[in-house]
Image: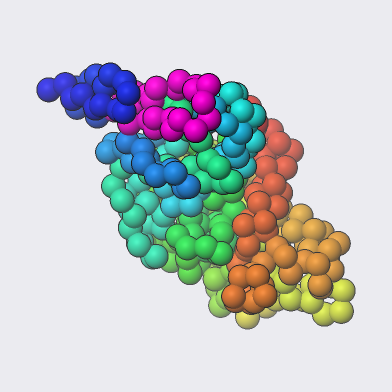
């Protein structure tokens, strides 16, 4: 049965049969008004003013989403999807101007962390347009046709953190990924290499969706505090082997540093030498070399960044009591997660990974 959704001031968008998905397209009026005081009709499924929130009842999967932001008056709009994933940073539009952007977005249930930590979110696709005077004139949602998927396997420094100020770098890397490729973040707070591998909601769930040529970024270390070198190497090797068996491309990512200084240099604990003396980043690099797997050395890159900023200025990368209400030298602020995501993106380009062709 076809379904028609209406919108203010326009005709409904006729949607295809359920087998083709509930939403083939949802488009607003897109009209510009000479009188800036005249309210502009929102696209179907959207409500509110600041923020503007939109909801589309689609099943889990990947979707091509095109939006037009701007309107009769000047505005500034940023676009967030699902569990606090930023896809469009704050973007200014002049009065009478409209700018169109396209993304491919992963929808999961539960959204956010796969084990449901922090809440399971709403079924379907949620979009939030925020910023200083957000404006949106059209939204189009349709199923994506076999996009390149980059899966993220990791811990709380990577995951879709449900509540600010905590932010994983997986929530910020999405701003750099153009349409045709999509980030699917299966990272989960508190996971070690072993717990992620064995939990059916985590690595097995991720693996079941991997198709040929999809990438799987694997970052563990923060919670491998008592993991032996042999167990750590075994866990990583098992993930690599299973991803390759599905035709996927495993990529190892060494963990970003903690902000723990001894003078002007980071301590061994900050650099992920764990409680039983295992240098986890070194072990990961060794596994990468033995298995001929690309390694993005975020430990080295973030060490250089944090030490260059020094004990004081580097605090802005993490959570500060004065700004965030909590002091935390492991988890990132939105700014810090953005900087770490930038280091991962740098590594993607350096390693000439397939995702590089889709980066903005």
The answer to whether residue 123 is seen in the rendering is: yes
What residue do we see at 48% from left, 47% from top? 50
> How far from the left and from the top, in percent, is residue 330?
63, 70
Does 196 lie within the magenta span? no
What residue do we see at 72% from left, 42% from top? 346
Quadrant of residue 301 in the image?
bottom right
Left or right: 258 as drawn, with respect to 80 = right
Q: Which is nearer the eye, 216 or 243?
A: 216
Q: Name the residue at the left extreme.
A: 1
- Can you say which quadrant of the picture contains the N terminus? top left
Q: Which is nearer the eye, 201 or 118?
A: 118
> How far from the left and from the top, in percent, is residue 22?
24, 29
Q: Which residues are magenta?
A: 23-44
> How far from the left and from the top, in percent, is residue 94?
64, 29
What residue do we see at 46% from left, 47% from top? 51
The correct choice, above or below, for 184 with respect to 16 in the image is below
- Can you say which quadrant of the picture contains the C terminus? top right
Number of numbered tags placed on the structure image: 0
What residue do we see at 33% from left, 31% from top? 44
Quadrant of residue 10 in the image?
top left
């Amino acid at each position: 049965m076809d379904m028609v959704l209406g919108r203010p001031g326009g005709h409904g968008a006729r949607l295809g049969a359920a087998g083709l998905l509930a939403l083939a397209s949802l488009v607003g009026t897109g009209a510009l008004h000479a009188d800036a005081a005249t309210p502009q009709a929102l696209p179907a499924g959207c409500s509110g003013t600041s923020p503007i929130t939109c909801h589309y009842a689609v099943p889990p999967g990947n979707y091509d989403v095109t939006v037009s932001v701007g309107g009769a008056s000047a505005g500034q709009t940023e676009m967030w999807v699902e569990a606090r994933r930023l896809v469009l940073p704050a973007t200014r539009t002049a009065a009478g101007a409209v700018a169109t952007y396209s993304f491919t977005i992963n929808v999961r249930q539960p959204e956010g962390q796969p084990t449901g930590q922090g809440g399971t979110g709403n079924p379907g696709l949620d979009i939030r347009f925020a910023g200083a005077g957000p404006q949106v004139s059209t939204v189009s949602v349709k199923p994506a046709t076999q996009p390149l998927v980059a899966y993220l396997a990791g811990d709380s420094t990577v995951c879709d953190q449900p509540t600010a100020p905590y932010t994983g770098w997986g929530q910020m890397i999405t701003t750099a990924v153009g349409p045709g490729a999509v980030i699917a973040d299966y990272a989960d707070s508190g996971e070690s290499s072993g717990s992620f591998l064995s939990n059916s909601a985590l690595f097995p769930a991720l693996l079941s969706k991997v198709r040929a040529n999809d990438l799987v970024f694997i970052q563990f270390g923060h919670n491998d505090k008592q993991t032996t070198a042999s167990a750590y190497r075994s866990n990583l090797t098992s993930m690599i082997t299973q991803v390759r068996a599905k035709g996927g491309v495993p990529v190892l990512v060494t963990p970003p540093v903690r902000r723990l200084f001894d003078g002007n240099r980071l301590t061994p604990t900050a650099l992920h030498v764990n409680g039983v003396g295992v240098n986890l980043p070194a072990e990961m690099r060794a596994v990468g070399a033995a298995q001929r797997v690309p390694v993005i050395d975020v430990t080295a890159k973030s060490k250089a960044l944090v030490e260059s900023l020094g004990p004081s200025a580097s605090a802005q990368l993490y959570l500060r009591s004065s700004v965030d209400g909590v002091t935390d030298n492991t988890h990132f602020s939105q700014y810090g997660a953005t900087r770490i995501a930038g280091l991962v993106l740098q590594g993607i380009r350096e390693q000439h990974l397939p995702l590089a062709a889709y980066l903005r």
